[in-house]
Image (cartoon, rainbow, N blue to C red):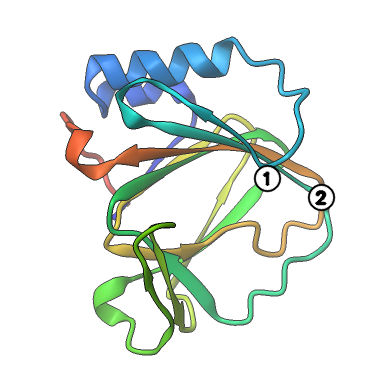
């Protein structure tokens, strides 16, 4: 499942109050003038990762990643990000077995769906969804990825796409 939103404030209607406040306060207090791949450990075992991509086209190569322990929250700061995805129940070809330390496995699959996130849009990507981001963007991309532990998440309202 993927939940999409146009503004980070929409998470207030999706996440519990403490998780929303933690993520929103973090975003509001960052100047985004930091090296790409910088990680921050937040409260409630949430990890924030700042990512920048140089605008070169990301060759998809039919790889989709999935997680078991974390939900990904992708929040675009600058330009756009394409996310391709497919339900893990429809994925049959495992490219890389599950790595519990880094919480991911890779599928070698053709994606079933594609969405574009624009500046200030977000996608909340649940473990049952194999996905790949930065697909065919062609522009410099800046974004935050938050890793939210599945066992800590309390989804109060779900509006899925």
Q: Position of residue 99 (x, y in %)?
A: 39, 67
- Residue 124 lies left or right of residue 83; in this view the side is left
Q: Position of residue 80 (x, y in %)?
A: 68, 45
- Residue 52 lies left or right of residue 63; in this view the side is right
Residue 6 position (above or below residue 133): above
Q: CA distance from mark 1 to mark 2?
A: 8 Å
Tell me if label 1 and label 2 are in contact, CB under 8 Å.
Answer: yes
Residue 67 position (above or below residue 59): above
Neighbours of disc 1 within 10 Å: few (<14), some (14-19), many (20+): many
Of the pair 84 and 91, the residue shown nearer to us: 91
Residue at image position (32%, 88%) is 92
For label 2, the SS is: loop
Q: Position of residue 3 (x, y in %)?
A: 34, 44
Q: Quadrant of residue 144?
A: top right
Residue occupying the far bottom of the picture? 93
Q: Quadrant of the N terminus?
A: bottom left
For label 1, the SS is: loop
- Residue 19 lies left or right of residue 96; in this view the side is left
- Residue 114 lies left or right of residue 142; in this view the side is left
Q: Position of residue 39 (x, y in %)?
A: 58, 34
First in sequence: mark 1 vs mark 2: 1
Query: Which residue was labeled with disc 2?
Result: 139
Residue at image position (42%, 75%) is 112
Neighbours of disc 2 within 10 Å: few (<14), some (14-19), many (20+): some
Disc on res. 80: 1
Q: Quadrant of residue 85?
A: bottom left
């Amino acid at each position: 499942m993927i939940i999409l939103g146009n503004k980070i404030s929409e998470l207030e209607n999706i996440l519990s109050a403490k998780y929303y406040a933690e993520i929103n306060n973090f975003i509001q207090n960052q100047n985004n003038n930091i090296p790409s791949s910088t990680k921050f450990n937040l409260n409630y075992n949430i990890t924030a990762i700042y990512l920048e991509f140089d605008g070169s086209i990301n060759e998809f190569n039919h790889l989709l990643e999935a997680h078991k322990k974390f939900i990904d929250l992708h929040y675009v700061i600058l330009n756009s990000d394409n996310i391709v995805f497919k339900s893990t129940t429809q994925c049959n070809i495992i490219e890389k077995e599950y790595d519990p330390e880094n919480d991911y496995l890779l599928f070698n699959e053709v994606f079933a769906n594609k969405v574009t996130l624009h500046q200030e849009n977000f996608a909340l990507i649940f473990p049952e969804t194999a996905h790949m981001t930065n697909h065919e963007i062609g522009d410099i991309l800046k974004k935050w990825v938050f890793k939210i532990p599945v066992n800590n998440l309390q989804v109060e309202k779900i509006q899925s796409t």
